[in-house]
Image: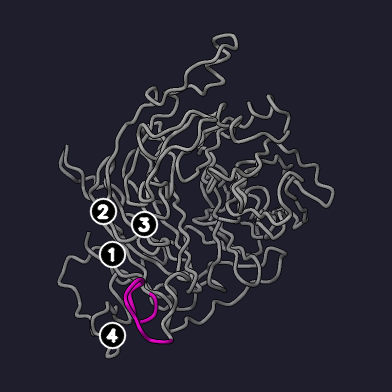
Amino acid sequence: CTIGVSHWIAYAMTKGRVRLIARANGARALLKLPPTFSPNSSIVDLVTSGNRLAGVTSDGGFVVWEVPPMVDDDIPSLLLVSVPPSQTNPYKSIKWHPSDPDILALATTTEVHLINVQRLYHAHGGDSISQHILASDAEVFPAVPGGVSIPGSGMPSVRMDQQIAAFAFDLSHGGLATISQEGTINLWSIGSQQPPSYQAQVNYGQHMNYSQQEQQLLWSGKVPGEGAPSSLFFMDQAQGVVIGRKRNTVIQLVAPKSTSVQATTKFVLGNGVFGSANTSSNAPDDREFFAHLAYDPRIRCIWAASSHRSSLMALRIAPPDLLAKPGVDAPLHFEQILDFPILHPTISLGILGTSDVNEMEEMERGSSGMDGSGGTAVPTGPGGEMAMALVAYVIHAGGVDQVLIGKQDLETASQAALVKLPVQSSPPVQQPRQDSPSIISPPPTAPGIANSAAVHPNGPRDQQKKAGGNPWYDPPVFAPTAPVPVMQSP
């Protein structure tokens, strides 16, 4: 992801630059990579936490900045950590810990480094350090159990299909999980292994042997599915796992600590299923068809934005069955899929983090002039704040748009949808197209998949504006070749 949302919007640009736009007043500022990076380096994965911004570069380096909540042209940013690229083991992705703003995880294809940003800043003062030094102050999680290397001794030996495709924090088990290209999930316990520098300090500077045997593997299993994994999310209270595959065009719901796939949604492009053989000269290039996923545990919803469709889709996961028999867990399933039009197909998607929702909702109400006293009436929560289901920013070919969807709007769309999923009665007959009889073709209005007319006869109330503060826009007209989600049995 190349966009992050906090007190400001941050999105990556060319030549190592990051644009910041203050959410409160639209003020702009610019960050630039330190001189130790190549002039051609750019941020390819960007994440925010409070007033901290971290990114992985195109050549495998890593930086962390601390930025004031209010920005301007002379922004007094502080460089906390800077790690130039490693040619042998470059970083690929990055994530903040969901509840600890000092903890950050970085992944290469062979291992994940869990670091304390504040500790590193106190030790090195923001000076450039090598990956070897950073790894000596990190908790290391390997792609393969027992496959971690001693820092400085070289890369561990990992097959291509064992390389890390994605990773995520699992707060329910106090762990961090990786998923490989072949779909194997390894769930590790955080804190079961001290970094080498911690061990050295405890022993008064003496060298300590670094052994991965101290690391605790909580669970491991291979989840079957179509295509290589692209993303990984853990639901709250150990309720399940969300896996995105095949550039996030296949979405799976998996039971906790299990390889059992309980529900699958697939996105379809044009008149062919993504990945299907199609010799037509006008067939879309599969490699250019992708989606971005974000999971919001507050409302048990997966937000999906497609590279070929001008909409945001809300994949709602059914809540736990309170009427289920004791000791018998009801299978996970998608309750509804709702479609909200936006202006453009999406290049990158960033949503507001759960921990910042209340603060940012209040800011949105103030900056938009939408309050409960006169003006535009908006739904409010128990404390009087705006009740928002989604505060998101999408990057497209023409710039950056803001998307706001109120909780009341989401519920209205849900109630107006044709049916809920899964359909218990006999499914409708799908008429195959003449030009591709072997390919799944959903009917114009598939059960449980709400198009814009079914959800909002007069258009949705998702509010969009340019990041610079342009007026609201009308929803676009859908192209007939846009991808359509298709429900499939696990």
Percent from the top left, x then y, of residue 305? 48, 65
Circle 1 is placed at which residue position? 420
Marked residue nearer the N-terminal end (4 or 1)? 1
Marked residue nearer the N-terminal end (2 or 4)? 2
Circle 2 is placed at which residue position? 224
Marks 1, 3: nearer the viewer: 3
Tell me the kind of residue under disc 2.
Answer: Pro
Marked residue nearer the N-terminal end (1 or 2)? 2
Circle 4 is placed at which residue position? 436
Circle 3 is placed at which residue position? 228
Residue range in magenta is: 269-281
Within 10 Å of disc 2 (Cα), the crowding (few <14, some 14-19, many 20+) is some
User: Is residue 325 a member of the stretch shown in magenta?
Assistant: no
Asked if disc 4 and disc 1 are in contact, CB closer than 8 Å, the reply is no
Q: Secondary structure at mark 3?
A: loop
Percent from the top left, x then y, of residue 81? 67, 36
Q: As displayed, is residue 212 above or below residue 33?
A: above
Tell me the kind of residue under disc 3.
Answer: Ala
Q: CA distance from mark 4 to mark 1?
A: 29 Å
